[in-house]
């Protein structure tokens, strides 16, 4: 299953047809195929794993559709910058 999902995400290329001209093919290194039947499911797996991470007591994740909000209480404002850096720099693995 993991190999199948990996093949779905890796090595994707696309070109654009615009006003009678076809662009060169470009690699897609990030994201899921737009309009793909698996894309919403894979996105939900990712967003739910982010929301289920352990956060400090003063941080509460709120998820709605394709948005996530990390709500920080007044008591945690001093540590807010560290939380944002930790969760936005790509070093934290979901789960």
Image: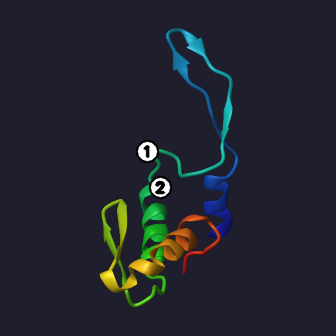
Q: Nearer the viewer, residue 62 or 45?
A: 62
* Extreme-bottom residue of the structure: 57
* Inter-mark Cα distance, 2 to 1: 7 Å
Judging by the rendered image, the residue that carries numbered circle 2 is 39
Residue 92 position within the rendered picture, expressed as x and y whole percent measured from the top left: 61, 74
Apparent side of residue 55 relative to residue 93 in the rendered image (left or right): left
Judge by depth and name the residue closer to the eye, 41 or 31. 31
Determine whether 59 is above or below 1 in the image: below
| Rendering quarter of residue 7 | bottom right
Across and down, in percent, residue 64 comes to 29, 66
Residue under the point 53% across and 71% down = 87
Display colour scheme:
rainbow
The residue under the point 49% across, 68% down is 46
Number of numbered discs overlaid on the protein picture: 2
Residue 10 drawn at (x, y percent): 68, 52
Question: Does 16 sit left or right of 48 as displayed?
Answer: right
Residue located beneath label 1 in the image: 35
The percent position of residue 26, horizontal first and vertical second, equals 67, 33
Closest to the observer, 87 or 32: 87
**Element at badge 1?**
loop
Q: Is residue 82 above or below residue 75?
A: above
The label on residue 58 is none
Q: Residues within 10 Å of mark 2 (few under 14, many from 20)?
A: some
Residue occupying the point 55% across, 69% down: 85
Looking at the rendered structure, the secondary structure element under dot 2 is: helix
Q: Quadrant of the C terminus?
A: bottom right
Q: Is residue 57 toward the left or the right of residue 22 in the image?
A: left
- Residue 34 or 94: which is nearer the viewer? 94
């Amino acid at each position: 299953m993991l190999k199948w999902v990996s093949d779905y995400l890796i090595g994707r290329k696309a070109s654009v047809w615009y006003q009678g001209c076809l662009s060169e093919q470009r690699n897609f290194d990030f994201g899921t195929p737009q309009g793909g039947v698996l894309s919403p499911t894979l996105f939900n797996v990712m967003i739910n794993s982010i929301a289920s991470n352990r956060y400090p007591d003063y941080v509460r994740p709120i998820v709605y559709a394709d948005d996530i909000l990390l709500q920080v209480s007044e008591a945690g404002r001093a540590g807010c910058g560290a939380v944002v850096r930790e969760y936005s720099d790509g070093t934290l693995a979901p789960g």
